[in-house]
Image (spheres, helix red, strand yellow):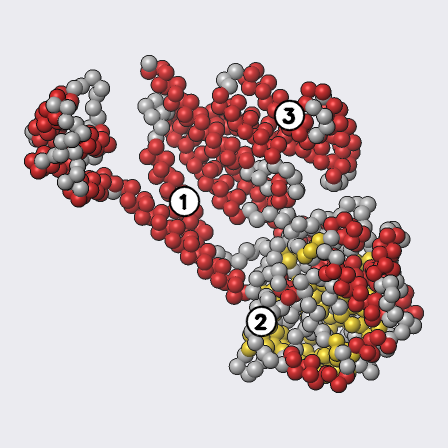
Amino acid sequence: MQAVKQEQHLSLYALLLYGLGYCLLAEWIYPLGEVANTDRGPFVFFLLVLFCTSVVLVSRVKRLSVQALAVLYVVYNLADDGAFFQFQWLQTFSVQAWQGIPKLLQGEYGEGTMAIQSLLLVLVLWLFSLLLRFWLFRSKRIGLFLFLTIVYEALLYTFMEYTAEAAIIRTLLFGLLLASVLHLSRLTEREGFLLLQKRVPHRWMVILLCFLLVTMSLSMAIPKAEPLWEEAFLWIQSLKKGDGASANASVRGGKSGYGTNDEKLGGPFRFDYNEVFIAKTSERHNWRVETKDFYTGKGWTENSEDSSEQLLDSKQLSQQKELQLYMTDVKTKKQTATVEMKRDYSFLISPGELTALPKFKDLAYYLTSTGKITTRNKKNDEQVKLQNYTVSYNVPTFEKKVLQDSDRIYPTAIKEQYLQLPSSLPKRVKALARKIVKGKNTPYDEVKAVEQYFAKNGFVYTATDVKTPGEKEDFVDRFLFATKKGYCDYYSTSMIVLLRSIGIPARWVKGFTPGDFEITSSGERRYSVKNANAHSWPEVYFQGIGWVPFEPTVSYTNPVTIQEQEKETTTKEAAVAPIKKTTPNNDKEDASSPSSSSSEEDDSISYSVSLALFLVLCFGIISYSYRRKWLKRLVIWHYRRNKERIQLATAYERLLWLADYYGYKRDPALTLREYATYLDQVLDTNDMGLLTAHYEKMLYKKEKNTLIWTSFQRELWENLINKMRA
């Protein structure tokens, strides 16, 4: 009999360990739906089979046989070819896996390698299940597996579009709880005791769980410092390419922000709401950093062979072709902007066509071929990161009629530099461009048709549900004909390629959207620009006018106003004049990212929820710790409140339950009278014997369901409860 009980207890112990262990293992397949767009169903099924066979089947041969069949069934689900017992699926899957091996070895991770990747994942899960058995019952240490799981989730969080906060919290909770159970097991064995010989330590588990929940809630609620090394991805990129920037204009290591390496666009990212700079100006416009003009089919590079920087003379700004945006005939008005940097950048952020540079002692400006203005020390040529500066610039007024009158006769230098397209560009892209502008008579009308094409044809803005094109895929072609979803880099690049396909010069501009603003006491607009405002847009060249910005990205609006007629200029400017604080609904370019106020509100709500959870947990722990004191009072209060309806049998049975709960166990071999004698001896009273006599008398008279207890019986009952101690 004792052996059976011990085996049941050991089985319950194994179930507990396997349950916690497989909860950790499940964290390895949980991200598949987000980062790989893969159906998790077959892998979840396989994990359940591993769990059940590990717990139920003791024989190693039977266990491994069932698990091997489960591997075949998962492969069958992935192949999805014919019936299971016809084995046609096995041949199909084998061919797919064999063809995918060379691609996988070459670093290609597209659809052609999904079969071999899925098989490898199943085998890895199987291997981990075998290791789990060793870690849980032989070495009784889970630290290595817990460490690998956290590293795995951290890598996904850093390099992929996966929000791992909740996953890491779950992993720590399951892992620390499992590590504690294993530690208790080692202690009991070392001290010469058999773990769970009598029962599972429920109370110890509850206390440990409450402790872990409290500490983890505190860690979530307390304020956190900014990371000291935020740009891990950029550092790794710098080891590969010698460039510490991101892969494209808007994405920095999986987060939004400005970067310099745009050779390979695409891939998911998450919005980063850290502030980049604060600007005071009366105008609303994008903030420029640089332009690029050479499209490779994957991204953008510099067209100029000479990428060196040249010293910039502030008195000759208008003579620099990289900085000259508008022709002299374009109406402009001069404005100034004061910029306060929150990030360390060794270049200027320009609000438009600059007319004057900030003046600082020993500071030199250098101009790159992309139009970026870098800052250096005149004495030692080291980079200088300006904190505050003021720039003067021109704000243009574009008139629709003037733009429509612009012809197609472009300067040779403009055509050579801004009509470039790769020879590998699919022909259907150019065919689509001609189809879009069919029936349009002027370059301006054609540009507007291309700009509006995306919004009218079901294209979707998303920063997460996107993938980097394969090695043989063109970035624009895939976006236009396959996915039709993406963020600013997708829309701006596609518009430029479409325009170049019909002979209209265009270039790619990188920088930031206007940001959120508030009104200062002096009436100026104070713009807060964050990494989430990083943006790219196209500029189109019009003969006799210059470079005009457009906005093809759906849900974004162009801050540059194009006047219908010259006489309406005043009316249009007046329409912009009323000043009110914007929200993401007012500035559509920020519609996909919350404002700073909403972010702070979310943080406040998160803090309040964490604090409330912490208080509830504290109350629960305190209540549980003193449960033996308040439980007696609660029972007495309840029975006093309903004393007119309480039957003696009900009260007596509750008394027996309380006695057992407080440690006065009744041996099944004892009669009620013998147990009453034992309890009276322990509590130094005669009350239990008297009350038991009344209870037995009631039983013999068969009045169990009718007899209401008397005040004397209630007094005996309360005295016994009050004398009970833990």
Q: Residues within 10 Å of mark 3 (few under 14, many from 20)?
A: some
For image coordinates 53% across by 58% down, the residue present is: 226
Quarter of the image holding residue 555?
A: bottom right
Up/down of 443 relative to 490, above or below: below
From the image, which quarter does the N terminus lie in?
top left
Residue 57 image point, x, y percent: 51, 19
Residue 357 image point, x, y percent: 71, 78
Q: Nearer the viewer, mark 1 or mark 3?
A: 3
Q: Earlier in the sequence, mark 2 or mark 1?
A: 1
Residue to which mark 3 is pinned: 73
Mark pair 2, 1: CA separation:
40 Å
Up/down of 524 relative to 644, above or below: below
Is residue 379 in view from this perspective?
no
Amino acid type of the residue tagged 3 in the rendering:
Tyr
Pointer 2 with pointer 1, Cβ within 8 A? no
Up/down of 158 relative to 418, above or below: above
Left or right relative to 294: residue 710: left
Amino acid type of the residue tagged 2 in the rendering:
Thr
For image coordinates 75% across by 57% down, the residue present is: 457
Disc 1 secondary structure class: helix
Q: Earlier in the sequence, mark 3 or mark 2?
A: 3
Q: Nearer the viewer, residue 476 or 319?
A: 476
Residue to which mark 2 is pinned: 582
Residue to which mark 1 is pinned: 213
Q: Nearer the viewer, mark 2 or mark 1?
A: 2
For image coordinates 59% across by 55% down, the residue present is: 230
Mark pair 1, 3: CA separation:
39 Å
Q: Residue 602: which numbered mark, if any? A: none
